[in-house]
Image (spheres, rainbow, N blue to C red):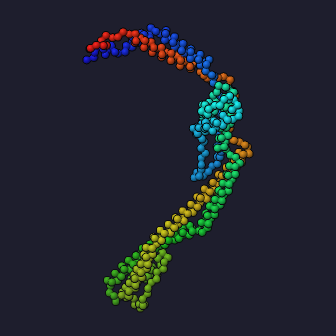
Amino acid sequence: MISQDNFDDEIDLREIAKTLLRYRWLILGATVILALAGYVFAKLTLPKQYEAATMVIITKPLFSANLDPRIQTVYQQPDAKSLTALALTDDIVLSVYESPDVRALFDEDVDLSAMKGRLEATVVGTTQLNLKVTDTDPTRAAQIVNTWAEIVTTRLNDLYDINQNSLEQIQAQVETARENWDSAEQAVIERLGVGRVDSLAITLAQKRESLKIYLDNIRSLDLLISDAQAMDAYLATLSQGDALTLDSDLALIALQQRAAGGLAGLQIQLVTTNIPESPTTVATARVRLQALVTTLQSQRVEFQDRVAELPSEITDTSADLEAEQYQVTQLTTQRDLALSAYQALSSQVVEAQITLAQNDRVVKVAGQAQPPESASGPRASLYGAVSGAAGLFLSVCMILLVQWWRSPAQPGKSGKE
């Protein structure tokens, strides 16, 4: 069960609101007084701050030659972080401070960190570096930012610009690239002059054609052997001493002519036997058929052996041809790359010569900063607003604290429940 004391410990917002309304003029007065005090303090006590700014422009990349995609090195513009970090490096800041024009503006030594605190560098896009200096003296602010811009411009030009020394280095690279191109071109000419690729291609085509011819001949021989054996089987059914009929004699002659005529351009040597010219009997015809079959089968064995050898020869020749073509392709690629490098470097030499002749720097200062006529700070209104907010908060807290302290103790706070 919830006791009465728990309800008494709860914050009464209505009572707090009544208290704040009762003392509203005190709160408002404290707020206004502190706001005016902050404003007057910033206006009369704090030193005025002046801002001087200038801009450094990166006009173009050093080289824009179009190289082969396999060797192209794309120009990378420095990113914002690298540019701002470079502009605020310790040696550059120290160079700005030790510059005679800047050093003469200070009556006493300035710490390096304090000097760096006056400087601000920001990047707009990828080609604009904004430099800003804040100082209590407008003339000094303008002199510092102008000196700083000149030093940063010199440093960036040393990094990204061209000079006579770098031009000579590029020209030496051009000579080396020309020698590499000549060597690669000569290697390609020598390799192609041997004619090994054409020779291997012709040999491979001949072997493949031979394999086709041999397979066709084997099929023709199989057909001849089958026809001869079929005729012999037919003659075996006749009386061996009978004279050969005219149809059978003509069929025998036709078989012999087919064999003697050659198969796909290959001559078949027939073995002849001493058989009387007449009369041609069935037995004599069978002897001739058996001799023809024996010759055809012998020729088929030779063709079959050659067919068994040709696939491996074709494979070896094809492998040799592919290896030779690969070597030629590699040499041709190296020649093309060497030519692209030579052409790109030649273009760089021309651009570098034009840049030197025009004395056209890559990084330039957009313009000289002038001493600002009006101060940029401190902002008295901001100080007043902050002070007023602080007065409002403190007055409210003080009134609530005093009201709580004056309030009587609640019954039941002490003693037993």
**Closer-to-camera residue (346/263):** 346
Work out which quarter of the rendered image holds the C terminus and state it.
top left
Q: Residue furthest left?
A: 1
The extreme right residue here reads 357
Front-lying residue, 243 or 294: 294
Q: Is residue 275 among what the camera can see?
A: yes
**Which quadrant of the rendered structure holds the N terminus?**
top left
Task: Name the residue located 59 percent from the left edge and 38 percent from the top edge.
Answer: 85
Please tell me which residue is depicted at 40% across the width and 84% down the height of the picture: 291
In the depicted structure, whether residue 204 falls above or below residue 243? above
Q: Residue at x 36, y 9 (%)?
A: 408
Where does residue 208 sit, x and y in percent of width and height? 49, 69
x and y percentages locating residue 232 in the rendered image: 36, 82
In this rendering, is residue 172 above or below 94?
A: below
Q: Residue 390 appears at what percent x and percent y?
A: 50, 18
Q: Quadrant of residue 221?
A: bottom left
Horizontal relation, residue 199 to residue 261: left or right: right
Q: Quadrant of residue 217?
A: bottom left
User: Horizontal and vertical percent for residue 5?
Assistant: 30, 14
